[in-house]
Amino acid sequence: MSTTSIQKTPLLDVRDLTVTYPGGARAVRGVDLSVDAGQKLGIAGESGCGKSTLALALLRLLPAGTKVTGEIRLNGEDVLAMKWGQVRAVRWAGASIVFQGAMHSLNAVHRIGDQIAEPILLHKLATPEGAVKRVGELLEHVGLPASRASAYPHELSGGQRQRVMIAMALACDPGLIIADEPTTALDVMIQAQILRLIERLVAEQDLGLIMISHDLAVLSDTCDRLAVMYAGRVVEEGPAAEVYERAHHPYAKALSGAFPRIGDPASRFAPRGLPGDPPDPAALPGGCTFHPRCPAAVESCASEDQELRTVGAGRRVACALVEPGAAVTAALPGAEEARSTT
């Protein structure tokens, strides 16, 4: 007897997403990504590589005049084709964002309980009395006592404010949470607590998670898959631990090498970062946009751009020097020195 496999629709499916700001800056260029329920996708890259622009584009939160093309399908529906009333219904209830810098995201003159209750009431998911009860439940769910609902943002610590932002993101039971640098301003102990909290909530509620960070170590520890962005494009994607430990693309290797490994003196004395900065999105170089900074670049890199291609099970890389199943062999800055100290 023959059986027919059923293709599961991803919770989020992004295809050929391009974002161009007024003035011609191409901040996101042809990005393809997908996230299933219960899956955690990390997006890494330096400042200016398009990570936050990508996050804002997913819920159409970009400034007026920004041109966005491609497809953003949330639960099978294209967000870019929605009318504004549909977009408002999707925000908070379909997908929500935890922004970086909770103190700047929370309203300083309103109690946190009122701010968490606002999306619940706007989406008419509870009466005012029911919203108060829901706020208390959410606060306790993220490790804060319900009594803190009467506090103002300045009366909370940085870690507590970030917990409030997570509670707000969960208020309307969304299927997808986008966390944009949720722990950047926190010390390492509080950072670890917030990361474990996010992991627990994703597992308990079968949520999809997109976590954005410049820190590959954090993403490899928290996420299932990792996508590395450079100049608005994904240049490498694969299982998070594999990309962090055995990156193929020279840029991903440099990002990984920029963070010292605990217990590894070589990485501490000879960090393998890269000089320079990502290119201006309004004046991108020809060919592979990474070639001006790439320690492994060859002549063709200056004229031939590279698309993502499969190089192994679950791995995609946009680099002419990476053969299927192989990694770039050219040494990165500091690599020889690092080996000589081991």
Image (tube, grey):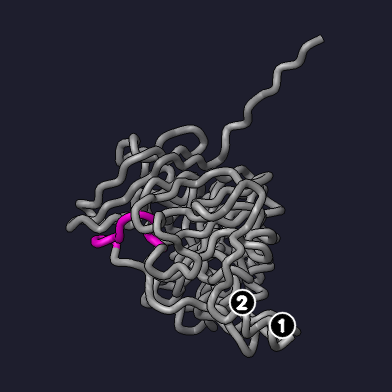
Circle 2 crowding by C-alpha within 10 Å: few under 14, some 14–19, many from 20: some
Of the numbered discs 2 and 1, the one sitting upstream in the chain is: 2
Q: Residue 137 magenta-drawn?
A: no
Residue 62 seen anywhere in this rendered image of the structure: yes
Which residue is the extreme one toward the top? 1
Secondary structure at numbered mark 2: helix
Q: Quadrant of residue 163?
A: bottom right
Q: Residue 284 versus residue 135: which sits nearer the camera?
A: 284
Mark number, residue 199: none
The amino acid at mark 2 is Gln
Secondary structure at numbered mark 1: loop
The amino acid at mark 1 is Ile
Q: Residue at x 45, y 83 (%)?
A: 154
Residue 107 seen anywhere in this rendered image of the structure: no
Q: Residue at x 62, y 44 (%)?
A: 37
Q: Residue 289 magenta-drawn?
A: yes
Mark number, residue 262: 1
- Residue under pointer 2: 191
Q: Position of residue 48 (x, y in %)?
A: 37, 67
* Left or right of residue 21, residue 55 in this image: right
Q: Position of residue 165 (x, y in %)?
A: 51, 67
Q: Position of residue 263 (x, y in %)?
A: 75, 84
* Left or right of residue 313, residue 273 in this image: left
- 238 shown above or below 251: above
- 47 shown above or below 190: above
Q: Kindly report the secondary structure that dominates the magenta region of the rendered protein.
A: loop
Q: Residue at x 17, y 58 (%)?
A: 23
Which residue is the extreme one toward the left? 23
Residues shaded magenta: 281-290
